[in-house]
Amino acid sequence: MIARDRISKLTANLILLALGILFVLPLLWVLFASVNRTAGLRVELPTSPTFANFKAVLNTTTTYRPVLNGLVLCGGAALLTMVCAVLAAYPLSRFKTKFNRPFLLTVLFCTGLPITAVMVPVYGLFVQLNLVDTLGGTIMFMATSSLPFAIWLTKTFMDGVPISLEEAAWVDGASNMKALRRIVLPLMWPGIAVVLIFTFIGMWGNFFVPFMLLLSPERLPASVSIFTFFGQYGEPNYGQLAAYSLIYTTPVLLLYLLLSRKLGGAFALGGAIKG
Amino acid sequence: MTTSATAVPVPAGRKAGRNGRPRGANFVKMMPLAPAIGLMLVFLAGPILYCVYAAFTNMALTGTGAANVKFVGLDNFRKAFGSSAFTNSIWLTLVFTLISAIIGQNTLGLGLALLMRRSHRLVRNFVGTAVIGAWVLPEIVAAYLLSAFFNDDGTLNVILHKVGLPGQDWLYAAPIIAVSIANIWRGTAFSMLVYSAALSEVPKEIEESAEMDGAGGWRRLVFVTVPMISRAIMTNLMLITLQTLSVFGLIYAMTRGGPGTKSQTLPLYMYEQAFSFSQIGYGTAIALVMLAIGAVFSLIYLRGLNSEAA
């Protein structure tokens, strides 16, 4: 029995290692190519590592402006999402009315709505309202599209804060909003952080929405500019492409590390959505 | 103050008094929902309704459909289902969803989660980091990395040559397979996390007692473990199917739907019709079909979930 157990453990480890290597190979390419002046398309160790690729892309048009745009766009949209999600989650979590279940089911359904499907009418709506190529309009749409998932997650986290604490506050005459601000929010800040960071990461990588709704090069976030910049000039410089990809990825990597170190990260997420 | 006072549920009478309270109280309590509902009405419900309207018109950005929009009944749908490009994109979407989400991400995610329970800590950390690393990458970066991987000069061919197999430019030879594998590479982490969380809540004793009764590895997996996490499986399947149906950036950046229309899934076909060819009416008809496919999948999984709960 023990020998069999050891063999099965060994097999599990070997299969996992093989899978891990398959997952790592494309990642290695971006790491190696970014410091290789003559980078090609295959994974190869650079003979003389250099930061020239990073220097070449670190300028206003290529990097600074798109990254700043991305921060404004995704930061603004994530905050708007969070405020609306917290407000919406409170009555859903605290008061049981006939309205809750249908609303939550609608939200669950919207969570999976193929956003690409509504982009044509949204574009039409933006033309009508004169919102095409405005950061404000794009922020509102991005916030809306991530709201259903954010509401769902926030409500799940809020359900974990015992209602008895608020009942004491209510007896003392506190209003709902005061109870939410003073009692519920301080107790669920890890949950808030998880939702906020996940919303931001999702938006940071989102290509289609800003690609459709923003036109001027000076308003494009990094997710779109990387595509237009390297798509325009025929054969791209792979080293620079890799360097830029790394710079563009850094914010979400940092946020993800923060999340998994401090908050149990995605495991909390997995626990929250398994329903 | 009086309004907020009526909104406060009085603890002592909470159970009995709910229905007896004036209607206004419920309304005020639900007020915080307003911003979220407002945004969702304007930017989600509005566009979906507009979709339903525009799909039955000849709306276009240029030409006759731009000047005077008129109802054309089911013409757009007739045109769609009569067009080989549309049926081709439906097939490709189903193939893409089946291979990359339902089979690929789901099975691989479950497999990884199961194997990780029996593996060494170092191996587990290495694999977990690699898989999650692929997931955290922005869509377009992932597309570039996988394009490089599948290219004629790319890493995949280097490996194939090493073991004596012929290589080719996979993005030309088998584009839909290449983008499906790209989506598996990028999306498996999500299923892995969901299943890891679900498995961690399966009581050890149940599996151990099954082992005592002589159930082998596969029997234990199929008859004990999988039924215990069936809710997680259904939820996960629903979420990843719907996500995969709407994948656009990954495919667009890797192949632009090509060569020809060999990887043109529904979102890309819709984009081409609505924006490259300016056929808004026809584009929204396609969007409506896409929403309908999403709804059908949701209903199937929700049924699965409900029958599970009952």
Image (tube, rainbow, N blue to C red):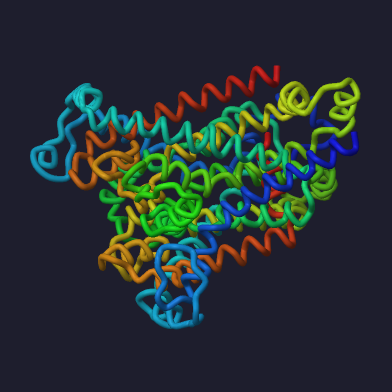
Does residue B139 show up? no
The residue that appears at 17% across and 25% down in the rendered structure is B72
Position of residue B40 measured from the top left corner of the image (x, y, whole percent): 47, 42
- Above or below: residue A205 compared with residue B251: below
Residue at left offset 80%, top offset 37%: B201
Left/right placement of residue B197 relative to residue B13 reads left
Question: Which residue is at the front of the view, B29 or B285?
Answer: B285
Place of residue A106 in the rendered image (x, y in percent of width and height, measured from the top left): 53, 32
Q: Residue furthest front?
A: B164
Quadrant of the rendered structure where residue A167 is?
top right
Quick check: A228 above or below B222?
below
Query: Image point 45% across, 30% down: which residue?
Result: B294
Q: Position of residue B63 (x, y in %)?
A: 9, 42
Quadrant holding the C terminus of chain B: top right
Question: In which image quadrant can residue B180 be found?
Answer: top left
Residue drawn at the location 45% of the way across and 57% of the way down:
B158
Side of A220 where B296 appears, left or right: right
In depth, the one of A57 and B176 nearer the eye is B176
Image vertical order of residue B262 relative to residue A249, above or below: above
Pick the front one: A50 or B96 = A50
Residue B169 lies left or right of residue A268; in this view the side is left
Can residue B227 be seen from the camera position used here? yes
Is B86 on the left or on the right of B62, as rendered? Answer: right
Please tell me which residue lies in front, A158 or B213.
B213
Q: How many marks?
A: 0
In the rendered image, residue A273, in percent from the top left (x then y), is placed at 66, 39
